[in-house]
Image: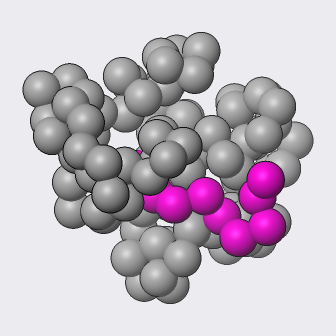
Amino acid sequence: MPVTTIADHEVHVDGEGFLTEYDEWDPSLAPVLAKAIGIELTDRHMEVIEFLRADYKTQGETATTRRTQAVGGFPIKEQFALFPGKPGKKMAYIAGLPKPKGCV
């Protein structure tokens, strides 16, 4: 996997720029990653990101938008408002996680 530098952190990424090593993510990366895709983070964004990271640690895969709603309590409509376009992909990118299964 290629290595790149984001906010003074060397991280491993895949061909689409998603981090590939869970432990290389740091909360200071979130605003930089978000800005790269046109999102300005709020506390609510970070609540979603924190849920995704905690869920990934226990499940071993990135939560889908449906799981983020059902388990995390973040309505799909709100996910689209916070992460317009492709919320699953954008949430995973900012959280330093792989794309959810089924995400194009």
Magenta residue check for 101? yes
Colour option used: one colour
| Number of marks present in the image shown | 0
Q: Position of residue 6 (x, y in %)?
A: 25, 29
User: Residue at horizontal 79%, vertical 53%?
Assistant: 104
87 left or right, relative to 51: right
Magenta residue check for 38? no
In this rendering, the answer to whether 53 lies above or below 70 is above
Span highlighted in magenta in the image? 96-104
Residue farthest toward the right in the current orientation of the protein:
77
Q: Position of residue 38 (x, y in %)?
A: 59, 15
- Residue 93 seen in this snapshot: no
Most common SS among magenta residues: loop
User: Residue at horizontal 50%, vertical 47%?
Assistant: 15
User: Residue at horizontal 71%, vertical 70%?
Assistant: 101
In this rendering, the answer to whether 91 lies above or below 32 is below
Q: Position of residue 100 (x, y in %)?
A: 66, 64
Q: 2 or 76, which lies in front? A: 2
Q: 3 or 19, which lies in front? A: 3
User: Residue at horizontal 82%, vertical 31%?
Assistant: 85
In this rendering, the answer to whether 90 lies above or below 12 is above
Q: Position of residue 99 (x, y in %)?
A: 61, 58
Q: Quadrant of residue 23?
A: bottom left
Assign the N terminus to one quadrant of the image.
bottom left
Residue farthest toward the bottom in the current orientation of the protein:
59
- Residue 3 seen in this snapshot: yes
69 left or right, relative to 54: right
